Amino acid sequence: MATEIERKFLVQGTDWRTVPGARYRQGYLSTVKERVVRVRTIDDQGYLTVKGITRGATRLEFEYEIPAADATEMLDALCERPLIEKARYRVPYGGLVWEVDEFFGDNAGLVVAEVELTSEDQAFKRPAWVDQEVTGDPRYFNSNLINRPYTRWEA
Amino acid sequence: MATEIERKFLVQGTDWRTVPGARYRQGYLSTVKERVVRVRTIDDQGYLTVKGITRGATRLEFEYEIPAADATEMLDALCERPLIEKARYRVPYGGLVWEVDEFFGDNAGLVVAEVELTSEDQAFKRPAWVDQEVTGDPRYFNSNLINRPYTRWEA
């Protein structure tokens, strides 16, 4: 298990849209934080992922590739509602890769960017399209965007 | 999806013990009946299984073989407590195969036998070691033997 240090930001404008995106559909069989079970299709690949709770800097995570037809059937018939639908763009900037997630469906209008760092104090160049930091804000966790989707947040 | 008709019985004595058993350790990442997620090791094989709710005679079920080390780590660190520990014996009798589950741990003392039939009115020969029928009794569902294990049932 590697230590992941991720910082998450809101995104403004569309200048980040410099690469083609991959289409994500994902849903949850469990959103209990001690044992999250996620089903996902990325374009035409299926994945089943099990995640534990974060303890210190580590989190157990197991991911398996599964037939996309199975994943689609689980998403359509079994997963909690609503599903998360988004496009992910891997945008190179300043020697790092920013993952920009543009949400659709019940979370339409939300665009967030994440960058993975190797230490908490690592300096990095911030793209002009990066806005307010929301690292650690649970409202933006994908598992919480199901129970409280962005389009239903109060102004 | 095949229609499964299973009848479940309590077991008396030890005359059923005519074949070697396989060791099962299993736990649950979700016991929500609409989306059960089960982790299992059978001897040295690992499995991750997703099951939907039974609607009429059908139930969605997806099973994946996973590394036994992953399954063991999920069982030890992530699954709901207690785990289900049992030995399963596949006992041939009267042209059918009876699956006898002998439970250990928090369910020690419980032994049940299941037989799979192809129709609800299929006649079958009942072994002498088969006792009371408990088909459909939710107390005996493996997913319920976690929250209410057999050793804690009231007499």
Image (cartoon, coloured by chain):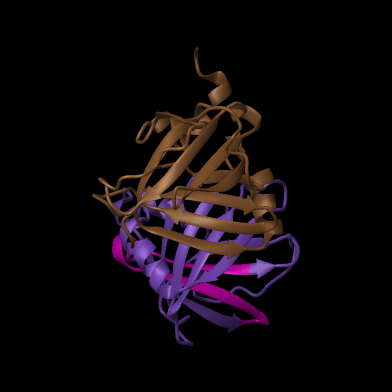
Chain colours: A brown, B purple
Question: Horizontal and vertical percent for residue A7?
Answer: 38, 41
In front: B68, or A88? A88
In front: A97, or A114? A97
Q: Residue B8's quadrant in the figure?
A: bottom right
In front: A96, or A27? A96
Relative height, residue B66 to residue A113 (above, below): below
Q: Residue B2's quadrant in the figure?
A: bottom right
| Residue at 31% over, 45% down | A123
| Residue at 65% over, 68% down | B116
Relative height, residue B75 to residue A18 (above, below): below
Question: Horizontal and vertical percent for residue B154?
Answer: 31, 48
B47 vs B87, left or right, is right
- Membership of A60 in magenta stretch: no
Relative height, residue B67 to residue A118 (above, below): below
Magenta-tinted stretch = B93-115
Relative height, residue A149 to residue B99 (above, below): above
In front: A23, or B100? A23
| Residue at 53% over, 44% down | A28
Question: Horizontal and vertical percent for residue A66?
Answer: 61, 63
A115 vs A118, left or right, is right
On-image quarter of the N terminus of chain B: bottom right
A69 vs B83, left or right, is right
- Membership of B101 in magenta stretch: yes
A25 vs B80, left or right, is right
Most frequent secondary structure within the magenta stretch: strand
Task: Look at the image and tell me whether residue B59 can be seen.
Answer: no
Residue sitting at the far top: A155
Task: Look at the image and tell me whether residue B92 can be seen.
Answer: yes
